[in-house]
Image (cartoon, grey):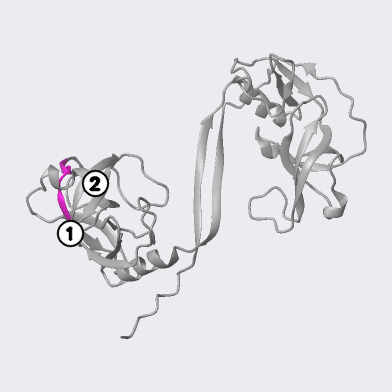
Amino acid sequence: MTLTPPPEALRAPLVVEFPFTRSLGPVQSAFLTGLRERTVLGVRTEAGAVLVPPVEYDPATAAELRELVEVAATGTVTTWAWNPEPRPGQPLATPFAWVLVRLDGADTALLHALDAPGPEAVRTGLRVRIRWAAERAGAITDIACFEPYESTGEHEPAPHDGRFEDPVTGIVAPARLDYTYSPGRAQTRYLHGLSERRTVGERCPSCAKVYVPPRGACPTCGVATTDQVEVGPRGTVTTFCIVNIKAKNLDIEVPYVYAHIALDGAGLALHGRIAGIPYDEVRMGLRVEPVWSEDGRYPDHYRPTGEPDADYDTYKELL
């Protein structure tokens, strides 16, 4: 008997990126507006500790905090880690240290970058000061970085009313994660199957559930799944949602429907977009089939087959 060797696991660069928009309460608004004005504000807790960055509720008692105080732009490194290869979007383009700095007058530490010539120049207890950005807009990036600075650490936090002209009331924080993704052997086989317009899952030898996409192991029984099973291509909509917000760089007009689809023979529903039917006519039990992408490598969306709807009892365990 000749055994077919498993395919080499796939690898590909992957970027997850999105803008995170949030409004600010009075404490965070004062803190970020203060940075724009080269002023660092903290908040005093019921026990008298000064927290920088400030929070709006006491971490020990959950009491609302509103007593703002101004602390110094100098401080002490409490711990650090060297970053030899800065990534895009990080504070500095040259190697630097990530540091936790307890600013003079504060009782907690602030995370930021330290501009230093090398790891030998960094130590716990190092005295530093803020290097302000040339252009400031009311964000943590208004602190360009920290830099070594010889000074004493004596500073009494001064009361501050938190009032500034044109306060910052909201921020947009870009989030980005780029890395090399490897799906593993099980999903590699699944992806190779999709390139042949086949949907291949794996059956658990213990509970007999067929997982699509396969995971390489049954999450319920904890045993390896090596028995490959072709499922579908048709399936049943088990549940769905109507999307009304258009995603950036996604050429799909809203509203559209995104659904859980239980392919025939599968023991788990997968995600897929439903098209070829008005969004308000999509329903649980709708029978669908894949419409493949132009390159034929994956289902672009699913459309109705024209079959009668599936009975609820046939898919109720897959919701």
Q: Is residue 7 above or below residue 13?
A: below
- Quadrant position of the N terminus in the picture: bottom left
Range drawn in magenta: 281-288
CA–CA distance in space, label 1 to label 2: 15 Å
Helix, strand or loop status at disc 1: loop
Task: Judge by depth and name the residue closer to the eye, 168 or 309.
Answer: 309
Tell me residue 99's x, y (percent): 76, 43
| Residue 167 visible in the current orientation | no
Q: Amino acid at mark 2?
A: Leu
Q: Quadrant of residue 101?
A: top right
Q: Is residue 221 above or below residue 319?
A: below
Q: Is residue 106 left or right of residue 197?
A: right
User: Quick one: which residue is furthest to the front in this view?
Assistant: 206
**What label sits on residue 318 in the rendered view?**
2
Q: Is residue 75 above or below residue 183?
A: above
Q: Quadrant of residue 294?
A: bottom left
| Residue 279 visible in the current orientation | yes
Q: Main secondary structure of the magenta part?
A: loop
Q: Is residue 308 left or right of residue 264?
A: left
Mark 1 neighbour class, 10 Å CA radius: few under 14, some 14 to 19, many 20 or more: some
Q: Amino acid at mark 1?
A: Arg
Tell me residue 84's x, y (percent): 74, 58
Which mark is nearer the camera, 1 or 2?
A: 2
Task: Judge by depth and name the residue closer to the eye, 38 or 312.
Answer: 312
Q: Is residue 127 left or right of residue 174?
A: right
Q: Residue at x 65, y 55 (%)?
A: 87
